Every structure is written in structure tokens, then in C-alpha cells.
Image: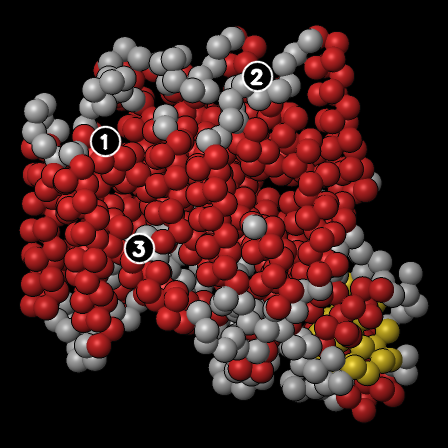
Amino acid sequence: MVVLCYALPLHESGVGLRAVVSFLVLQAFAFALPGMLAWRLIRGGRDPGIVDLVMGTIAFHALTVPWYLVVRWAGAPHLVWALPIATVAAVLGVGRTRGLRLASESRVPLWCAWNWAAAIAVGLTLIGAQLPVASGNRVRWQGTDNPFLLSLAAELKNHMPAQIPFVTGQHLDYHWFTFADIAATSWLGGQELDLLTFSLIPLGLLALGLAAFGALGWKFGGRPAIGVVALWLAVLVGSVNALGGFNGYIVDGTLLGILWTGSVTQAFAEVLAVALLYVVFDLVRTDRSLPGMPRSRAVTAANWLLFVVVSFVVSGAKATFVPVLGAGALVALVAAFRQRLRWRSVLAIGIVLAAELVFAQVVLFGGASQGLTFEPRTSMARIAERAGMTGLGAGALALVGVFLVVGWLVPLTAAAACGIRDQRTDRGTDLASWWLLGLVVSSMVIVLVTDHPGFSQYAFLRAGLPFAYLGVASGLVRLWERATPAWRRAGLVAIPLGAGACLLVRHWSESSTRPRGAADLALAVVATLALVVLVAGLVAIAARPGVRPVVVLLVAGMFALGMGTVRTVDAVSSFGDPRPGAADKGPAVIPGGGIEAARYVRANSGPDDLFATNAHCRLPSGMCQNIAHWMSAWTERRAVVEGWGYTPRANASGDTIGAVIESPFWDPALLALNDAVFLRPSKASLDALLARFPVHWLIVDRRFPADVPGLLHLLPRHRRFGQTFVFEVSPSR
């Protein structure tokens, strides 16, 4: 069922069935099989088989990244196949010679497995219904940043150490480990990078991430039911937003939405973080009677190694996860030290995370801030302006921050029930719960006190907020177990009331077109805060022995599950809408024949060949947006100067995303040297360029200024692909 729901949307959006099957077979033999065997060996076979498969696949993707970097640096990328082959041989050999148990000791209950499959299938179906139909130039319906992402994947496929491919001589200061994984997958299976980056891998990460989240819920709560509830919440429940006009950043706390819309780097890191927390929860807990707890020093040591490898790759896949995970470790360390629990283990984890944060900042980012600044007031002011609230004072801006937090937490009210002591196992001091608390709270705090021209600080929120659903699921299941059958039925009846309340809030935020001021904001904040205080008080009362948690169950069910009802209604109502095609997404970023021209250059050049181009803007009309990256993406070659957007120097050039992507190039002399060949082609202008850069190709986009007749006279060796010309400067290698 899951495989079918993965393959059909891709096939209907233009991805060939053969490509889908090839990708799935590759994942099975290059990642799933060796990963499952290695995970089972490391973990001692105490996890259920499906957990071995899912978590092992994730862990092996993490292990593949450093291995690929080594073989790519050595100039032998095809040796990436040596890792899965050697792993399978080694695990089977060790298991046979040492008599290690490779069979799983536990199984997932059948009802639990079907719920996991159904939730993942629903998630894939909801996302699959949104996939536009590709027609010809499939990137035309992709997001603005996707050519940039593809250019980094192309760079990692062909070079190590990597550079920024669209501006010569610029160090790659970015979390680029995700693209190393994509490049390794391309070398393993031979599939095109654009197909992997835009279609096959994102949807695969979605399925893998949801499956892993269900397993993590089981691990966190110790019961299969908690994993099932956590998974359904991750698919259906999101945040409430009454600000309006700013939905793309501050709402949609569903793991489903984040795994798909948060970029492929966000999705890859999110999946790795789920597997990392699965291991961390073992390392910080002391109750060996719980399922999956370490039972020997060898198993514990192997888990430490697993933690180091996965956390290292997380730091390079999306560095926003490291401070959030570190904050969770800090809170858990305080709790562990006060309670005389495993504080040494938590301290060791914190030290590793701190070291990796330093590594990411110094090595991956080169000490650059990437435009992130400590500006709490500026961030709130920009949000208020986007929401139609202007002229607000400092006090009102503080209310904006309060309201954001309230909106994020309203559907998560049941998480407060995590503090209720489980009477059967007496796990009220569980360090995993403290870790989760620090992780979720820090992700919200960082967002409120930082600012970024492109609102990229919300990557911290996406890193931490989805894990709050582990607490929600645990709280709901525990409250459900404590309630009588009558109160359970009452809680189910209350769900539509919560859905109605959420619908009213959304209707108000979307229908109100008049400018709103501090009075409107204050009224909304006071009303919502009153509700949250009421819920918190009721939870505190219910936590006392002998008190029925009926009201808490009603309120928690209303908002936690009610929002899921809203999303289900939305999804069903829009499910039959015709899906957009490539031509429905505005002007094309790539000229006619552009991809064909780029692939011609790729087929007739070496990985180190350099090209020059006259196209530096994303579109030929309007203000010049410096985020033109499609040539370096599809040629898989480096440019003298294509676009310069999303470089550290460009990110630091303005306070807003508009100013950043419209900023001029910092080296006008280099740009003039490059453009002279296209605007005034002559032997002198070409020789001047070649004296500094060994350019082998000139790529001309006719939508931008260029003296094409002069270039044809200067360089007769050329090919035309629609609106794109390719001139060969020197014989291909």
C-alpha cells in the first residue's frame, strides 16, 4: 500500500515508472539491506523488524555521506558501492562466526503496523495530490530555490572539496551534506540529479520520516499506541494562525508539511534527527525494563558510535538542528544532575553536539552568519507588517511574539499531560521528556529573538516543533487510559467543537482585509491566553492523584485532534481539483532549449571545465534577481559568474530578502570582464577573459543582452537549442 501510494503520484506527475522502480530497488539493496543488518547488529536485535528496516536505512544514509566524501576526494566515486557490499559481508560474517543473534526479538502488533501504513499512505496521497503535472521543462513548476539546490548537488557529484559552482573562487559555506547523499545516490544508480532532487528523494524522505516518527513515538512513550497517535498527529495536526497574511512561515507545524515543503535539506536533516533521538533516548534512560534499552556494554558502545556518526551528519545536513538538540541536552543535563541520574551520559552527548556546532560554524560556514542576526524587535516588526499590522509600538510587538507562541501551542495543549506521572512505571522523571521539553521550547525561543532577510530563522522552529507531537501523543494516551468509558465518548464528541473553533480562527484571519492594529492583536492574545491558562490549570488539577482528567481530555481532544479534522476536511475538499501544469506557474526561469543545451555541455566536457554566460538574473524582466543558477545546475559545471544570490556575501548585503536577491555583484570588474565577451565580442575581450579563467564554453540566453552575430563570427563552433546558444571556446576534452 505504501509503495503504491509512493509510485502513483510520481508516475502521474511525469516520472516514469521505470525510474521509480529503479530508485526503489536501489534503496533496497544500497541502503535498506545493509542498514537493517548493521542496525540489528549494533542494537542487539532488540528492536522490531520494521524498526530495524526504517532506522537502519536512515542510519546507512548517514554513514554513506562521510564515506562518499572520502571516495569522491580520492577521485573514485564509484567506490561508494564498496560500503554496502562490505557492510553486508561483514555483518553476516560476524553473525556467523560469533553466533550473534540477527533475528529480531520483538514484533510490531498487527493493528499498529496497519495504522503506520495507513498514516504514511494518507500522507503520500495528500502530497501526491499537490504534485503538478510536468510538461517538457519540468523545473518550471519547481520552487524558486530548486535550481540553486540542484547546482549544489551537481557540485558535490563532481568535486571534492566543493565550491560554490555559480561564482568562481567562492568557498561553499553551507550545510551541504544533503547534496553529498544525493550525489552518492546518483553514482550508485546512475539516475539524473534533477529527478532525484526534485521528485524521488523528497517523496522517499517523506515516507521514511513518517515511518521513523511512529517508531520514535513508541520509543518515547514505551507503548505502540503512543507511536500510532504521534504518527497520525504528525500527518494531520498543525498550528493555528490568527495573524493572517504570513502563513508560509509561522504555521503548518505538521511533520508532513515540513518534510515536503521545508526543502530537501530540511527533510533529510529531520529524518536523521528522528533516528538520532531514537538512539539518544536509549543513552539517557536508566530503566532497563523498558523495551529497547541497552543490556550490555558492547551494545551501549555501539550505540555511542551510532550517535556520533548520525549527529555529525545532522550538523552538516542542517546546522539549525544542532543548537536545538543541544538545548534539549542542556535541560536534560540539569534534570539528570539534580536527580542523580545518568548525567555523565547527557554531558557527553552535550559535548559532542557542542563540538559539532563549532565544526559546522567554522568548517561548513567559514564563520559567516549567513545573514542571521540577534534582532528580536526587528523580527517581530517584519512579521506584524506582513500580517497587516503597522505602526505598532514595542509593547504590541511583544504581543505579536506571544501570539505566535500561543498559536504554535494551542493544538499541543495535551503535551502538558506528559508531566502526569504514569502510575504503573513511575516514569515522571524520564530524561527523554526533559530533553523533549528543551528541544521544543528552544526552537521557539530562537525564532523569536533572531532575524534573517529571508525568514530562514524559522528553520529552527521546523527543527524542533514537530517533536512536540511525541508529548501530545503520550499525554493523550495516558489521559485516555485514566478516563472512564463515558468520558472517553465525551472526548470524542468534543473533537468537532475544537475543529469548529479552529475553523473560526482561520476564517477570521483569512477574511479580514482591513489593517489591524494593536487593539485587535491584544484582544486575540488575551482570549487565547485565557484558554491556555485554563487548560494548564486543568492539567495541573488532573495530575493530582484521585482526580478525573475528564475536562483536560475534552479540551486537549478538542484542539489537538480538532485541528486534524480541519486539515482532513481541507484535503478532501481540494482533492479533486485539477492539478496545475508547468505552464500555469508564470514565466519560465529557463529559456527554451536551456536544459538540452546544458546537457549538451555536460556530455561534451570534463567535470573541471569552466563556462561563462550572459545571464545573471533569474528573469529577463523587472528588477534583476541575482538567483540565476540553472546553468551550473544542469551542466554540472562551474561558471565564472552566473548568479551570485545565496552566497554569504550576498546574504550580508541587505536586511530583507528583496534587498539581498537584488543586490549588485561585489566585484564589478570581474563582471565587466565576463560580460565584455558577450556584449562586445572580439579576440581581445575573449583573450582577456581566458587570461584569468580557462573558459571552455560560452552559454548565451537570448532573452538577455548579447551580440550573437559577433559571437558567431568569433566562435564558429556552436550549437543552437531554441533560445539558447552554446559556443565552444576550445576543443572538448
Q: In this rendering, is residue 100 above or below 235?
A: above
* Residue shown at the point (31%, 13%) measured from the top left: 341
Dot 3 or dot 1, earlier in sequence: 1
Type of residue at label 3? Gly
The residue identified by callout 1 is 481
Residue 338 vs residue 468: left or right? left
Residues tagged 3 and 2 counted as in contact (Cβ below 8 A): no
Residue type of the residue flagged with mark 1: Glu
What is the number of the mark on residue 617? none
Q: CA distance from mark 3 to mark 2?
A: 38 Å
Amino acid of disc 2: Gly
Q: Give the image location of residue 7, x and y in percent.
A: 62, 57
Q: Is residue 186 above or below residue 141?
A: above
Could you tell me which secondary element the residue under label 3 belongs to? helix
Check disc 3: other Cα within 10 Å, few if <14, some if 14-19, many if 20+: many
Residue ID for mark 2: 44
Foreground pick, 696 / 155? 155
* Residue receiving disc 3: 564
